[in-house]
Amino acid sequence: MTHWFHRNPLKATAPVSFNYYGVVTGPGASKICSDLRSSRARLLELFTDLSCNPEMMKNAADSYFSLLQGFINSLDESTQESKLRYIQNFKWTDTLQGQVPSAQQDAVFELISMGFNVALWYTKYASRLAGKENITEDEAKEVHRSLKIAAGIFKHLKESHIPKLITPAEKGRDLEARLIEAYIIQCQAEAQEVTIARAIELKHAPGLIAALAYETANFYQKADHALSSLEPAYSAKWRKYLHLKMCFYTAYAYCYHGQTLLASDKCGEAIRSLQEAEKFYAKAEALCKEYGETKGPGPTVKPSGHLFFRKLGNLVKNTLEKCQRENGFIYFQKVPTEAPQLELKANYGLVEPVPFQFPPPSVHWTPETLAAFDLTKRPKDDSAKPKPEEVVKPVKEPDIKPQKDTGCYIS
């Protein structure tokens, strides 16, 4: 597959024992705590397991989230929160700010943070699949779907759960609106890259491809704008990626728009459109170099060496030469000084996030189970005692090196 995607690191978290000595007064409550502990550990393991697929991830995530729901919502489906919501402290790092964790004594914070990591896993799974040699049509569809699922999870967290936090997200942290919006838009843009590649493969009309490329470039520009007020120390590398993809797909849009103009016998305008494509491709090439040299979260690669990048350069060059030949032999049209305005709107192929919902509470949550958690038996000075700082170890992610890109078919 002719794609390369930037990825930020997974969030790391402190271990949680779910041991509530004195509070747990029955076997049902004890089993809930044991299952929470094991299902959380299992889910965290799967984030870095290369054999994990979307079905395994969904099952493991549903298992943990359905148990966690009893700590968040009342069992009678009223709007009341669970009496256990604030019983446990949770610590999570952020994707951009290194290993400095945020902590909240709130099960909603845990739900959001773990959900965020599940969405990140889907983006990393898509990226890994997209880097395979000889990718099948079904695998390419899975890349597309995984990115839409990730966008849906991020969107659901932003709209339905982050507003419920008692302590608002700090500036520059993952749960802050600017960052989560950038993640949503990036997932949509990357899924549209797969759509564009499919449209090119099936030789769809250049006008449709130009419009999709233009919309995708706008997505990347919008994501970059969402991050524009963040501290460059930790956002610079991500922003270089978004900017270079914006330039890259603007070059694509001008290239295919030029083909549309040539087909309409507007050869002079076509040449000018291709010249603009050349300009944006050169910008993207310069940004590729800058991306490789910029420090910050994310992989160290040379995107300009990938086939997805080189193919566009050849296409722009060959199409421009063709237009110039045709103009010299047939049309003799003047080349405008101003580049054509791209006012393109795609009617097909635009990506929308897949709607997401957390699972309902586990069947193990019953009024009797909940009653077996007796908060009156919590140690009186439990929260007053200073506790030793838990170390939040960074996630050891598998080092995936991009495989040789064969430019295989994409769906």
Image: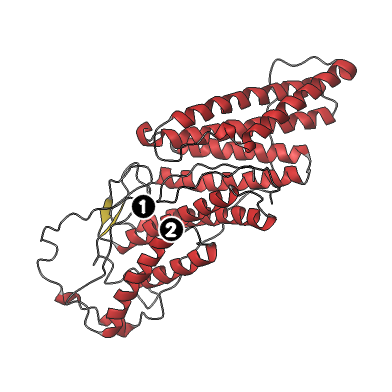
Q: Residue 87: horizontal and vertical position, in percent? A: 23, 67
Q: Is residue 224 above or below residue 395?
A: above
Q: What's the distance in space between the residues labelled 1 and 2, CA to CA?
A: 9 Å
**Callout 1, which amino acid?**
Val
Q: Is residue 25 visible?
A: yes
User: What's the residue at 50%, 36% (across, down)?
Assistant: 301
| Label 1: how many Cα within 10 Å (few below 14, some 14–19, many 20+) | some
Q: Is residue 290 above or below residue 183?
A: above
Dot 2: what SS?
loop
Q: Nearer the viewer, residue 236 or 269?
A: 236
Q: Is residue 339 above or below residue 355?
A: above
Q: Are marks 1 and 2 in contact (CB under 8 Å)?
A: yes
| Label 2: how many Cα within 10 Å (few below 14, some 14–19, many 20+) | many
Q: Residue furthest right?
A: 330
Rendering colour mode: secondary structure
User: What's the residue at 31%, 50% (across, down)?
Assistant: 168
The tag earlier along the polypeptide, 1 or 2, is 2
Give the residue number, with chain letter if any, for mark 2. 47
Q: Residue 1: horizontal and vertical position, in percent? A: 64, 46
Q: Is residue 216 above or below residue 129?
A: above
User: What's the residue at 42%, 59% (across, down)?
Assistant: 115
Q: Residue 121: horizontal and vertical position, in percent? A: 47, 55
Give the residue number, with chain letter if any, for mark 1. 395
Dot 1: what SS?
loop
